Image (spheres, coloured by chain):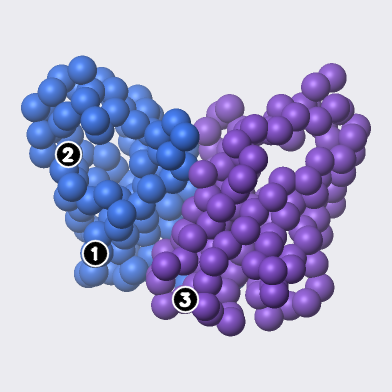
Chain colours: A blue, B purple
Amino acid sequence: NAGVTQTPKFQVLKTGQSMTLQCAQDMNHNSMYWYRQDPGMGLRLIYYSASEGTTDKGEVPNGYNVSRLNKREFSLRLESAAPSQTSVYFCASMELFLSYNEQFFGPGTRLTVL
Amino acid sequence: AQTVTQSQPEMSVQEAETVTLSCTYDTSESDYYLFWYKQPPSRQMILVIRQEAYKQQNATENRFSVNFQKAAKSFSLKISDSQLGDAAMYFCAYWAGNNRKLIWGLGTSLAVNP
């Protein structure tokens, strides 16, 4: 039981490049989330998927797209990376009500955009 | 708007002593959940303790306990017998079902001095 996995763990991009951050969970959770964490800013929600087939914007969606590929996987895409997207990205999952609304987190991806 | 405020950006405690981290929140909901998450230098987000708003009894998990004051909208975390491994960033978070997402505080960085 791996929980929530994220790939890659580290990535360096040049401005304008694109990439996809992958997230998968093996806990059969319905809801999945993408956050970014910046110093002094706490965790900010980028996008979330309350259930398979649905996605919604969070606080800071600009410059990102997401795909809920199936119940297990939720990817985050940067189409044209900018230095302002340098951050640590976390994926999380949860099952509403069954786990007292606890979110389970992946290990994070540290992304640097030059 | 629902908000979570952690008024102490940084705190320190001597090993084996007790420390209390503060959290206040703003909501008009009556049914919700509150959480404390720990983020050590490894970056992994770990749930420390949770509290259901309908429960009057304060939650306790080993050396960690909360002081939940519903009327005051206060949710503080007490760490007893502090250990070096408790050094981390601590985040307070709030969940109400209608949001389908966690609202996060900005975090408190806790240093434990030997």
Circle 2 sits in a helix, a strand or a loop, which is it? strand
Evaluate whether residue B56 shows in this view: yes
Locate residue A85 relative to residue A17 in the image: left or right: right
How crowded is the residue under tag 1: few (<14 C-alpha within 10 Å), some, or many (20+)? some
Q: Amino acid at mark 1?
A: Thr
Circle 3 sits in a helix, a strand or a loop, which is it? loop
Circle 1 sits in a helix, a strand or a loop, which is it? loop
Q: Which residue is mark 1?
A: A55
- The answer to whether the residue labelled 3 contacts the one labelled 2, judged by CB atoms less than 8 Å apart, is no
Residue at 37%, 28% (x, y): give it.
Answer: A110
Q: Which residue is mark 3?
A: B97
Q: Position of residue B101 (x, y in %)?
A: 42, 64
The nearer-to-camera label among 3 and 1 is 3
Labelled disc at residue A78: 2
- The answer to whether the residue labelled 1 contacts the one labelled 2, judged by CB atoms less than 8 Å apart, is no
Q: Position of residue B103 (x, y in %)?
A: 47, 59
Q: Quadrant of the C terminus of chain A?
A: top left
Closer-to-camera residue (B17/A5): B17
Q: Amino acid at mark 2?
A: Leu
- Is B7 placed above or below B56 here? above
Closer-to-camera residue (A93/A25): A93
Residue at 17%, 29% (x, y): give it.
Answer: A82
Q: Position of residue B61 (x, y in %)?
A: 79, 55
The part of the image, by quadrant, that contains residue B45 is top right
Locate residue A77 relative to residue B19 in the image: left or right: left
Q: Position of residue B109 (x, y in %)?
A: 63, 33
What is the CA distance from the residue labelled 1 to the residue labelled 2?
16 Å
What is the CA distance from the residue labelled 3 to the residue labelled 1?
17 Å
Callouts 3 and 2 in the same chain: no
Give the chain letter at badge 2.
A
Residue at 33%, 36% (x, y): give it.
Answer: A7
Q: Amino acid at mark 3?
A: Gly
